[in-house]
Amino acid sequence: MKDIVIAGIGMTGLGKMPERSVKDLSAEAVKLALSDACATVDDIEAAWFSNTRQQMLEGQNTIRGQIALRPLGFESIPICNVENACASGSSALYQAVTHIRAGMAEIVLVLGAEKMFFPEKRDAMFQAFMGGTDIYRLEEFTKNIEQTAIDMIPAELRNVDTGQRSFFMDSYAAQARLHMQTFGTTQAQLAMAAAKNHWHSTMNPLAQYQNDMSTEEVLNGRLISWPFTLPMCAPISDGAACAVICSSSALKRLQKNGYDPKRAIKIRGIHLASGKNRAADDFANHIGRIAALGAYEQAGIDGQDVDVAEVHDATAYAEIQQIENLGLCEIGAGGAFTENGDSKLGGKTPVNPSGGLVSKGHPVGATGIMQLHELCTQLRGEADKRQVENAKIAVAENGGGFYENEEAATVVTVLERQS
């Protein structure tokens, strides 16, 4: 197969930005990525646009990518709109890679943008999450979630109204309780994962939150859905990210514009998986594990070869689950791996040096590309105080939606520093 690389990548800062639009955020990210790749609009032969909320909250639907990109000068080329829940950005990348491998283009653009914060539409903001599961089975799913490992919840905290939250916090909470029941994972270990990421984010100027938090402060946060407190959960975020993807042979075209090919990051493997019917406690066949094994097979590696990872920690538990799926530790050992400091900067395999979704932020359609931004920054040696020393192999895990007892879609991507 053709060698495919990320030639350039850029992202906006993250936060709650009521004054900004999807088009505005998109324009900033595209300009950053083109500049990073020494590319022009005329170099781009096709584009993919990832977004999940604009049709519901801004009213723009069906041709979102065309609307975002034509004002920037992208005309006549194929533009595809991609929506695949929180895995939308990495799913767009998956399609772009496939397009280049098929010989349909040499240099393409992948853009993810999301505007989630609308203070005047608070109910709609949270209602938007409901479409990420089977609405025809919502009552069934809700009942299953409420009953999963219910004995793990302290009696005085059962059936407590903690206020408005997304459906996904309850679904992740159920998965966390089952993991705790099965493997002895503790609430304190979940808090350690979150505290670690809040510390990491203090070194990321693009992060939504940049405040250090101790494990105790995380545990004492407002209860969302047991065992989660607010600092263990990803916030509502606005932001955008964009990448210029090309075949390695096309780098010569960019070199004419002054591009240094040593900055190109190789996409060594990428795999998109959907879930399958399995017992809830069959962790070895979790969708994240299936995606990881597929990407690793392409890349010719295993989890022990990974130097740094960005995983989809929509909650602190999700990080523990995904480092197991990626083979950074044995299944069931994610809590201990975290408690030992192995996932922290300076540890065995740093995870989410960006601050992760819980602190960096989670603008759904852009998240997958933002993970790659952090990993490219790490592999280029440009991460400053949060730099992972001698990082060569990096892995991103990006999951989305909820079906039965896991995410509905997951993409795992393996990146490699070439020099």
Image: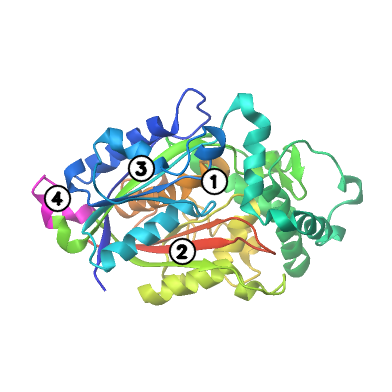
Q: Which residue is mark 3?
A: 384
Q: Which residues are magenta?
A: 252-263
Residue 277 locus on image (x, y percent): 66, 74
Residue type of the residue flagged with mark 2 = Val
Residue depicted at 37% across the width and 77% down the height: 300
Look at the numbered disc 2 and give the secondary structure of its residue. Answer: strand
Look at the numbered disc 1 and give the secondary structure of its residue. Answer: helix
Q: Does the image show residue 207?
A: no
Q: Does the image show residue 61?
A: yes
Q: Upstream in the sequence, badge 3 or badge 1?
A: 1
| Dot 2 and dot 4 residues touching (CB under 8 Å) | no
Residue type of the residue flagged with mark 1 = Leu
The nearer-to-camera label among 2 and 1 is 2
Question: What is the spatial separation of the Cα atoms under label 3 and label 1, in whole angstroms?
Answer: 20 Å
| Dot 1 and dot 4 residues touching (CB under 8 Å) | no
Q: Which residue is mark 2?
A: 412
The label number, if any, that marks residue 254 in the structure image: 4
Left or right: where does residue 164 sit relative to residue 386? right
| Dot 3 and dot 4 residues touching (CB under 8 Å) | no
Q: What crowding class fits label 1: few (fewer than 14 Cα within 10 Å), some (14-19), or many (20 or more)? A: many
State the quadrant of the N terminus.
bottom left
The nearer-to-camera label among 3 and 4 is 4
State the quadrant of the C terminus.
bottom left
Question: What is the spatial separation of the Cα atoms under label 3 and label 4, in whole angstroms?
Answer: 26 Å
Q: Upstream in the sequence, badge 1 or badge 4?
A: 4
Q: Is residue 363 above or below residue 270?
A: above
Residue 362 locus on image (x, y percent): 53, 43
Residue type of the residue flagged with mark 4 = Leu
Residue 186 locus on image (x, y percent): 73, 57
Left or right: where does residue 101 sit relative to residue 272? left
The label number, if any, that marks residue 357 in the structure image: 1
